Image (cartoon, rainbow, N blue to C red):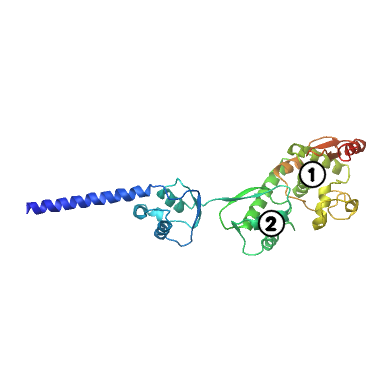
Amino acid sequence: MVKFIKVLAVIFLLGVLTLLASLYYFEQGVHKVINIAQPTIFDVKSGQSAKGLLNQLKSNRVLEQNIGLKIRLKLQPELAKIKAGTYELQPNMTALEMLELFSSGKEIQFTIGLVEGLRWRDWLQTLKGHPNLSHTESLQEEVNKYLSSLPHDTLEGLLLPDTYAFTKNTPAIDVVKRAYQQMQSYLEQAWLNRALDLPYETPYEALIMASIVEKETGLASERPRIAGVFVNRLNLNMRLQTDPTVIYGMGEGFDGDIRRKDLKAPTPYNTYVIKGLPPTPIAMPSKLAIDAALKPLETEDLYFVSKGDGSHYFSETLQEHNSAVRKYQLKK
């Protein structure tokens, strides 16, 4: 009888040791680095269970074994609450860290850069072409619906240039709305801090000016001075006479050259013909251009001409300007 009890004790002890060894082995697997050689995008589908996901990862050989993680699901039930989305797995990530990532909902962020100086139609193509943005119908149709709630007929100039982060399959219209709201916020604050005696009646007029400054400026440092030239001209009731507005008014008819007849063509945007500002912005202005339009440099300058290197020569008189045109443009 005693011998039998000893045998049972040995068997029990061996069983416990085997169990402990198995648990240790499976626990080691929990902390083992996953089998990927480079950052990998992984989609967790809606409705997928944690156990089903672990089986998929083992089948895909991302995990050598998943029993340890399944045990963890019993010990830490919160890890079983995985969230659908798109995640980025890193080569140095452990199996447990991967499961924690799926339960955190911290999806990978994609980005889109919306560049200053471009028009809405350029941005539209950028948004439509991004592989990780979605739209269920024509994006322009979604924009038109959005515009119906705004006091404007076009988004030209109303979206703040920036790099926007988003998760996979975010509706493109959501990025548009964010860019609009950020522009409104920045413009409102800049308007409150504007210089005195500016020739704008509304923030929107300042935005129109900012878009012109954006298109005319090659060097960021010159924006306030160029804005100052245009402000001086408006205050003297002079026409702005700026080529970018002419080009914008020509639309698809612009072939890369402005001819004398184009400068005389009567469009709402031709500032060689009309006085004052055009009816809308002509591009998406940056924060720097908005700041320049609302805090222009105070000078007596009324003219400027490109020097061919991105910078400009500024003049107070027409005679000096004509001389600069001959020097820098006509090379005489």
The C terminus is located in which quarter?
top right
Give whichever of 256, 50 is nearer the camera: 256
Q: Position of residue 99 (x, y in %)?
A: 42, 52
State left or right for residue 3 relative to residue 315.
left
Q: Which mark is residue 216?
A: 1
Q: Position of residue 68 (x, y in %)?
A: 34, 52
In this view of the protein, can residue 95 be seen by the observer? yes
The residue at which mark 2 appears reads as 125
Q: Position of residue 127 (x, y in %)?
A: 65, 56
Give whichever of 110, 29 is nearer the camera: 29
Task: Give the image quarter of residue 328.
Answer: top right
State left or right for residue 307 relative to residue 39.
right
At numbered mark 1, what does the secondary structure look like: helix, strand or loop? helix
In this picture, is 123 found above or below 320? below
Comes first in the chain, label 2 or label 1: 2
Give whichever of 157, 102 is nearer the camera: 102
In this rendering, which labeled residue sits more in front, label 2 or label 1?
Answer: 2
Spatial separation of the CA atoms under disc 2 and disc 1: 23 Å
Badge 1: residue crowd in 10 Å (few <14, some 14–19, many ≥20): many
The kind of residue tagged 1 is Glu
In this view of the protein, can residue 195 be seen by the observer? no
Residue drawn at x 28%, y 51% is 22
State left or right for residue 6 relative to residue 224.
left
Badge 2: residue crowd in 10 Å (few <14, some 14–19, many ≥20): few
Residue drawn at x 85%, y 44% is 234
